[in-house]
Amino acid sequence: MSRTIKVLLAEDQAMVREALAALLGLEEDIEVVAQVARGDEVLDAARAHGVDVALLDIEMPGATGIEAAALVHRELPAVKLVVLTTFGRPGYLRSAMESGADAFLVKDAPAAQLAEAVRRVLAGERVIDPTLAAAALAEGANPLTDREREILRAAADGSTNAELASALHLSQGTVRNYLSTAIQKLAVRNRAEAVRVARNKGWL
């Protein structure tokens, strides 16, 4: 008889988390041994419970699922990582794979598909939602540099150049140049549109 696969479930919405845990609990060879609601709790929980697979939602407080995946991949490389998302944004897929994720699936996938993904990543396979894979290939790489992404994220709340410069310890001219370059790369008219487009593509 094969051993039980120990799973960690990281999802900030309690109803979704409990539903996923219940569905996976119906599988004879899978046991959800830990649940967390924050990205910054993932590593400690994975270590404490000796999990085989971590299922990580992208949008969580504390740290994103992608950030949590990168941390677990570095500290506990034997743990397999499945990133789940409500948002089918191609940029998220690329970021997830770069962070060490073994699978990337949308949350509305059938429960049987999720359970099968858990088994497949443990067997050494990589599992990617085919629609997202095609979209990511069509979209191409994120054109924004790390600094441009950082400044766009900071600008999302409507901060002025002076406020951004102060918060990021840069000159106003430097902030203005980075924003201008990002706006040009994204072929939009202003910073608000740049933030919206970059978010929709999963580049922030």
Image (cartoon, rainbow, N blue to C red):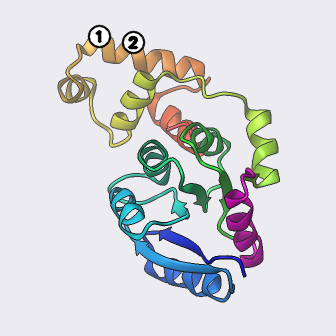
Q: Is residue 112 magenta?
A: yes
Q: Main secondary structure of the magenta part?
A: helix
User: Dividing the picture into quarters, in which one does residue 200 lie?
Assistant: top right
* Picture coordinates of residue 115, whole percent (x, y): 71, 73
Q: Residue furthest front?
A: 1
Q: Is residue 143 above or below residue 131?
A: above
Query: Residue at left 45%, top 42%?
Result: 74
Which stretch appears magenta?
109-126
Disc 1 is placed on an element classified as: helix
Q: Is residue 96 left or right of residue 159?
A: right
Q: Residue under circle 2? A: 177
Q: Are marks 2 and 1 in contact (CB under 8 Å)?
A: yes
Image quarter where the N terminus lies is bottom right
Query: Residue at left 60%, top 59%?
Result: 85
Query: Residue at left 76%, top 77%?
Result: 112
* Picture coordinates of residue 128, whole percent (x, y): 74, 52
* Picture coordinates of residue 156, whole percent (x, y): 38, 40
- Can I make out residue 109 in this image? no
Disc 2 is placed on an element classified as: helix
Disc 2 marks a residue whose amino acid type is Asn
Disc 1 marks a residue whose amino acid type is Gly
Q: Residue under circle 1? A: 173
Foreground of the two, 36 or 157: 36
